[in-house]
Image (tube, rainbow, N blue to C red):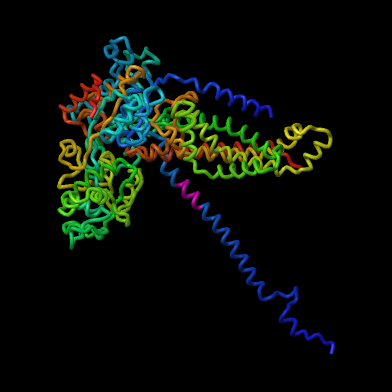
Amino acid sequence: MNSPEPVNTMTTRPSLLEPGKNLKKRYRTDLWFQRIGITAIFLSLAFIALLFFQIISEGYTAFIQTNILLEVEFSEQAFAKENLATADYPGLIKKSLTDTFPEVKSRNGKKLLFSLVSSGAAYKLQEMVEANPKIIGTRQKMWVAAASDVDMLMKNKIDRKAPEENRRLMDNQLAWLDILKSQGRLEKQFNQTFFTTGDSREPELAGILGGVKGTALTLFITLTLAFPIGVAAAIYLEEFAPQNHWTDLIEVNINNLAAVPSIIFGLLGLAIFINFFGLPRSTPIVGGLVLALMALPTIIIAGRASLKSVPPSIREAALGIGASKMQTITHHVLPLAMPGMLTGAIIGMAHALGETAPLLMIGMVAFIVDIPGAITDPAAVLPVQIYLWADSPERGFTEKTSAAIIILLAFLMTMNSLAIYLRKKFEIKW
Amino acid sequence: MKASHLLVAGSLSLFMVSPAFAARDYISIVGSSTVYPFATVVAEKYGKTSSTKTPKIESTGSGGGFKLFCGGVGVDHPDITNSSRAIKDSEIKTCADNGVKEIVEVKIGYDGIAVANAKTAPQFKLSRKDLFLALAKEVPDPKDPAKLIANPYKTWKDVNPELPANTIEVLGPPPTSGTRDAFVELVMETGADTLEAMKALKKADKKAHTKATQTVREDGAYIEAGENDNLIVQKLQSNPNALGIFGFSFLDQNGDKVQGSSIEGKLPTYDAIADGSYPVSRPLFFYVKKAHVEVIPGMKGYLAEFASEKAWGKEGYLADKGLIAMPDAERKEMAESVADLKVMEGK
């Protein structure tokens, strides 16, 4: 009578100690979930590796440049005139080349010969003479940049076996280059020009310094405006503002602003800063203002989140021992919230670093050779430089584009490591 | 939080200083992306050989350039605008309304548009009629030429029996590009005019005719490859069946990778574009605000550099960059009008 019919219970309600039928299936789904996660991580790592490999393998050659060793005679009669700037520097280079290859006589042949050396070589001579006029009357051996086509050939980016009419370099040019090479006068050397000059339309003369300085100036303006304003707005909204319809409305709008396409900020900048306030076009000050507007919502949202994460007990304790509201915030809450705020600021800045769309509207997508020295000089930023080079017809700009991307990534990594360092430094555990 | 106080003070002081810029000591140039590669070379050469600053050049497109240029006189407005087409009457009027009354027009040379494919594939021999039939969204029905139908042609052989039986696949610029405007005008419109049915339509309904000649098909045969011509060259290499449309300078730089197709029997070579026998070419211009010439430093020097034989001459450095030089007489006449700053006659 009181036997509990064990068989029946076993089938409907198994013991917790016994493995059930579903358990295997549950383990399996668990395993699958893990596998999918691992695959996703692996895939994204593979994509990053591919991206880096692609960019670095394409771009590292831009850091070296083919140079030609020339022996230039700074003859007295070439500098007969008082003004050093008007001397015929290209003529000196041409003379040196014809001295090296005296057999080249025809006009066309000479033109081909002269085109082996970059047009920048003459400016180099000019700089040398202006820096040290004593070299007039002497012979100097010097390395000058080869033309971009020669550089591409040395880097195996031009197919020398292609039929002559389809090549940028003619057969006799190749022969001259082979002679120079056998004499050790054609060498690939570290490309200093790339790090010390601004933009150029000749790939071998183009440099990234203009873009780097433009970016630094623009981001300086962005940071000095967006960070203090963003932090102040976050503190007010989180600590002081009353909870009512107005603050709700402001909160919703800040969140909306964070999602506004960046080109809209460019239009705003054009209408307000340039057309209304009359600030000069294409300058870091306008660029920085526009990017500051763009980065503000991100900084405010991150700032509020980190203020919210400070436990109320800290505030209550401070108020309890007689601190004023302002003292509570500046002495206790803000230092604790700072690491999170810095992270938000860096995310905003990194976002601003990569923008070209808003800058298009305010004229920063422009060809600018001179390196900007102040926030009111015309300047381009790194992403703009990448965009302009990617669009250039000359073959030599392909590697320059990738090299500029490497520099941009380096910039980004420096900023991120700075953020991590600051965060670690200010982090307070409780 | 002393540091952030300093930052606030610093940024406020920046605001104070900012409205104080009046003078501009560099030339500001805007305009066409087609002229941009040439103007930038001149600007750079000029900047390096003179004591003034290097001019700043923005690539805004021809229309965008005129909009900025005609904004008014004064340092806030650009001094020169580049254009891949002549200024329109409406633009002259906008300019005049804003006080820009004296404009100097300078023609700098010609630019050819190439239809090219990969070196690995056979060269195409095309005509503008073939290109119209292959690329227009609507073409006259082969059975009943009076009616326009959606483009039925799938391969080049369908268009013209002499062409290979490859699928029609053309990579070209998007509608925002000046190259696209010129292609439509020089190829599609003239190609359409060779067809009797389109001529009849032009007489009967001008609007419908314009629409039919200017609309490029959207069923995948014409692929908008973006403004970046380098990208088109790369895509042609990986897809030997495709043709690409881009400026002559890109063909010139990539002669080992792509080949230009002949159009009406003429190959896109420097000489054929220069003597006008290659049909798809257009003049390039820039426009100068005369009122600025004396005000902005370096204007005269820049103009002289551009109009010098070593720049825009047949052997000049712009020719090396792919600009097709004007005939000798025209160049001489232009150089004179630049030197005299001859103001455009109102149309």
Residue lying furthest front: B204
B267 horizontally vs B1: left or right? left
Q: Main secondary structure of the magenta part?
A: helix
**Left or right of A374 on screen, residue B270:** left
Query: What residue is at 44 percent from the left and 33 percent from the top?
Result: A362
Tell me if residue A49 is in the magenta stretch: yes
- Point out residue B208 in the picture as x, y percentages from the top left corner: 25, 51
Taking A344 as reference, is A116 above or below it? above
Q: How many marks?
A: 0
Residue A413 x, y percent position in the rendering: 55, 39
Q: Can you see residue A213? A: no
Q: Position of residue B221 (x, y in %)?
A: 30, 55
Looking at the figure, which quarter contains the N terminus of chain B?
Answer: top right
- Residue ID at (64%, 44%): A248
B264 lies above or below B30: below
Specify the quadrant that holds the C terminus of chain B: top left
Residue occupying the far bottom of the picture:
A1
Residue A129, picture quadrant = top left
The image quarter containing residue A38 is bottom right
Q: Provide residue B227's location: percent of width, then percent of height.
A: 35, 43
The residue range painted magenta reads A46-53
Tell me if residue A104 is in the magenta stretch: no
Q: Is residue B143 above or below residue B61?
A: below
Q: Is residue A238 visible?
A: yes
The quarter of the picture where residue A162 lies is: top left
Q: At 16% from the left edge and 57% from the top edge, which residue is drawn?
A: B162
